[in-house]
Amino acid sequence: MRIERRLRQPWWLSVVVPVVSIAVAFGLTAIVFLATGHPPLHHFHRLFDAAFLAKGALSDTVVSATPLIFTGLAAAVAFRMNLFNIGGEGQLYAGAITGAAAGLLLAGAPSPVVVAGMMVAGMAGGLVLAAIPALLRAFLSTNEIITSLMLNYVAALILDYLIFGSHSYLRDTSGFEASVFPQGKTLPDEATWSSWKSAGVVLPLGFLVAIGVAAFVWVLYNRTRFGFEVQVIGDSARAGRYAGMRTRRKILAVMCLSGAIAGLGGASEDGDFRHQLDPQGLRGGNYGYTGILVAALARYNPFACVLIAFLLGGLQNAGYTLQGADFPNGLVGVMQGLIFFCALGGELFVRYRVRFERRAKAPAQPAGEAAS
Amino acid sequence: MNNSLLVVVLASGLAYGTPLLYAALGEVLAERSGVLNLGVEGMMLVGAVMGFWAVQRIHVTAWLALLTALGVAALAGAAMAAIHAFLVVTLRANQIVSGLALTIFAGAAGLSSYLGNDLDLSGSPAKHQFDEIFPKSWQDLPVIGPILFGQSILVYASWACVVLVALYLGRTRPGLNLRAVGESPEAADAMGINVAGYRYAHTLAGGAFAGVGGATYSLSITTQWSSGLTQGAGWIAIALVIFAFWRPTLCLVGAYLFGAFSYLPFALQKYEWAPPSELMQSLPYVMTILALVLVSSRAARLRFGAPAALGVPYVREER
């Protein structure tokens, strides 16, 4: 058996391979079900129903998908340049912190001002946290994978400190209940991001902003010189340098853009859904890490990120809805993991072809044949 | 005297550092072969749940049950690592993405909690657990008693593992081959070393160590199963590998340092002046970043830095 690189990728492969991958993932999940004595079809039906079909399910799916679009785009932007920013998780927290602070500080101002302030603050928060690995990478060549990963935990602990470990400005300190069950201060009404209802589905402002960001990223990467240079550096850093591209500046710009997008996602969590700084909710979502997988599955294409985030958001939402006695715990993670594994494995068949042949007894044939 | 803060923190640092040490030793092996596995947390959790299951369900004498449990935990961890190895070595997938997928698949919201639930393990204490092995009179010795003699056998076994891994990496032919694979797979391949084989073997060994690390939690520290009981120890272990510059002996020092930091907040609870616990918990991560920055000069990186081929798939035809 030999695996060789495809010289041309037929267009239909990029549709067939993901579809087959997901089908295989469902097949494997069915095996897990059967092995543990659950009827697979019944559970699949319930999952699908809870994710997309039931009344209000689509609206809930949009809620779960919105942060994943942001973190997915954040990862896609950086990964496209081979900058492995896995700090989306922490940058989302940072954006949620600064976004909530802005919402509280601007209380009393007209609503559009407050919302805009939260967006800017959220982006700034994520940007600042992403700037640390960016500067270290650009000036000291420190591995950004590790530094951004470590900062996730630092950001999570700052989040905990603000709500559970101190009497900070962001914590609700009024009343008896708040002292027993620490929680974030409720944001003022002006800080609630508006939402629109279309065909029975509630579309929050954050979701629309996320789609706007996806369009922005697409234009930036496909229609501007900046995007072109980023992709050249991503494909071959050396070629970029020889062509006189400013690699260091690109590293800083791309990481900061990535952090800002994740931070905007954090602000949207505050303004759209949670209306307070909610450490447990934010940490429970695993948005940053899932976002990286969203980006990988989407092959760093911004619009595909939206689609994949929507599918995974549906799965997550169904998991929350069905959580209970007769629905196995931890199943959603298993399914998500299997989908990721299959999609990652499927990637190989897009880039490579597998050939089965007898091992030649005679000396190997000249290499020219491989290029068919 | 044995209740003084320093002794308590040091003794607990050893106990809490041990699972980190096992997981980090495994990750050192995997990363030295060039495979970055970010799925440590998931592998630890699956090891923890399967080890606990073995102790609850296998009815033999205590020490045999515990030994079997460690074996089951190691196998479970290695099975998880095998998924990662297959994806990144054979199918050439991105190592970061595959490792994160493994954490989600096996982690607190995935397979480990599915198994814990399905095998009905939560809520009951372990039937057998790893206890202190030295007599009480030894444990009562001032200072060294609780620190050196008040530990379970897993702590002493981990010391043996450190020595073995250090010798393996520095003094044996397979160990040197392994380092060649991680630094320059092209050269290793030209020497006739089976690059894929080495990467598979050491990623699996890494998973086995992580599984044992997880079982250390469920059978020695918490002695019961609850979903997500490692609470991010897998990530600290990944930090530890970098903090220790990919060296097993430094892992030992770092593990106890990080273990002490993770216990310090509990020890300081009774004091008025205690600094915020979040500050101490964040120290391992901050120190890892600082350690990386310190060795970021080119010369230092060659000596102390990551294996040169870490994270890069090796494809013979495309080198």
Image (spheres, rainbow, N blue to C red):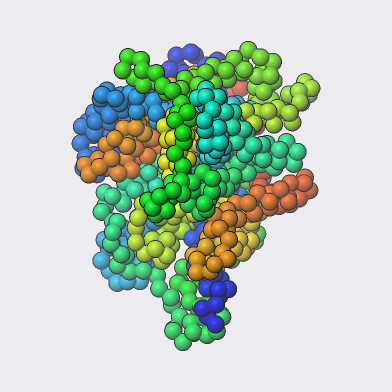
Q: Residue at x 38, y 44 (%)?
A: B109
Q: Is residue A51 above or below residue A224?
A: below
Q: Is residue B73 above or below residue B149?
A: above
Quarter assignment of residue A317: top left
Q: Nearer the viewer, residue A247 or A3?
A: A247
Q: Nearer the viewer, residue B186 or A56?
A: A56
Residue B14 visible in this rendered orientation of the protein: no
Q: Residue at x 77, y 46 (%)?
A: B297
Left or right relative to B120: residue B6: right
Q: Residue at x 64, y 61 (%)?
A: B250
Q: Is residue A269 above or below residue A210?
A: below
Outermost residue toward the bottom in this view: B137
Left or right relative to A138: residue B106: left
Pick the quarter of the image with the C terminus of chain B.
top right
Residue A337 visible in this rendered orientation of the protein: yes
Q: Position of residue B73 (x, y in %)?
A: 39, 57
Q: Position of residue A356 (x, y in %)?
A: 45, 26
Q: Residue at x 64, y 54 (%)?
A: B287
Q: Position of residue B35 (x, y in %)?
A: 56, 44
Q: Nearer the viewer, residue A194 or A268?
A: A194
Pick the quarter of the image with the N terminus of chain B.
bottom right
